Image: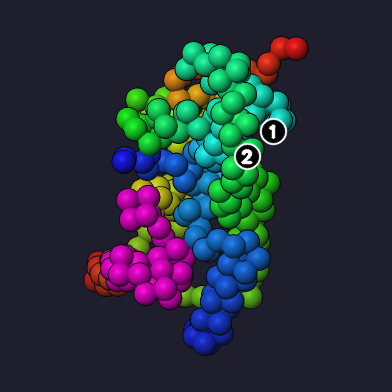
Amino acid sequence: MPQCPHEASCRLFPLFSMGGTLAVWKTNYCCSDFTRCARYQRNLREAWVPDNLLPNGMLLKKVAK
Amino acid sequence: MTYWPFWLCALALSGVALLHWLLIGRMFAVSGRFTALTDAIRNWKRSADSHSELSQAEMLEALRAATIAEFGLTEEQAAQMDAELRAQAQPAPQRPPTSKQSLPVHVLFFVAIALGAALSARMAQGHADRTLFFATFGHSPILLGSILFGGGLLVGFGTRMAGGCTSGHGLCGVSRFQPGSMLATAAFFGAGIVTSLLLGALR
């Protein structure tokens, strides 16, 4: 199974590795076609990747209560 | 002209590299640190737009909501997956803490280098031989400044291409028997010797 080569530096990978609901990201991006991950693509262009950038390209925002 | 004893220089250099590793947990590498400094400056403003204002709990909550939205999960499915996780009670993978240092630490590092160089130059007054440098390039401050600036740019370009400089490759890499570092160090010093001989011949 391919694994994203950027997993060591990705700030979200440890969260996806916690399991539960969040593991779906790991299954669908980190351990499958990681080249379509927005974080991976961003990291190819520049070293800095926003912590709140999701693999699908959306930006994570605080949940309104 | 009197140089400092070679053994004193060797002890000082290795002491600095060892202390850096012991205190900070990272290899002593000036060019690597400079890269980290420029990255820190570049990312300074950007980090304000990141999730840094979110706490860990808020981050996880937002991430969970985004997961449900992205993959079309129902709240029940998500709750079941999280319950299974709790039942398995697998600890999250631990990784060693990354020594992500802040901008002031990088700045302090280079201020310390400048202070050390100034102290060294002061102690070496009357001993250091700069005749070859001045004989080759003259005494014009503008010309000397331009040459030093150009030399600095070339050093920066070269160290980025080589993946390290004399401290990273020469001090730390060679002491760890890294083949690439040995080759890089041989290239550094080889080029230095050839340049010095050429300048001497042109004089």
Q: Is residue B77 above or below residue A46?
A: above
Residue A2 vs residue B23, the one in the foreground: A2
Along the viewing direction, whichever of B50 and A14 lies nearer the viewer = A14
Q: Amino acid at mark 2?
A: Ala
* Dominant SS type (magenta): helix
The disc, 1 or 2, on the residue closer to the chain's N-terminal end is 1
Q: Looking at the image, which residue is at 41% across and 68% down?
A: B173
Element under disc 2:
helix
Q: In the rendering, at what x and y percent does residue B178 appear?
A: 35, 70
Q: Give the side of residue B43 with respect to residue A45, left or right.
A: right
Q: Which residues are magenta?
A: B158-187
**Point 68% across, 46% down: residue:** B104
Instruction: Please give the residue where the numbered disc 1 appears in the rendered image.
Output: B56
User: What is the chain letter for disc 2?
Assistant: B
Q: Residue at x 40, y 29 (%)?
A: A29
Q: In the image, which is nearer the foreground, mark 1 or mark 2? A: 2
- In screen coordinates, is A60 left or right of B200? right
Q: Residue at x 48, y 43 (%)?
A: A9
Amino acid at dot 1 = Gln
Tell me if mark 1 has few (under 14), some (14-19) or many (20+) residues whose alpha carbon lies within 10 angstroms of its own.
few
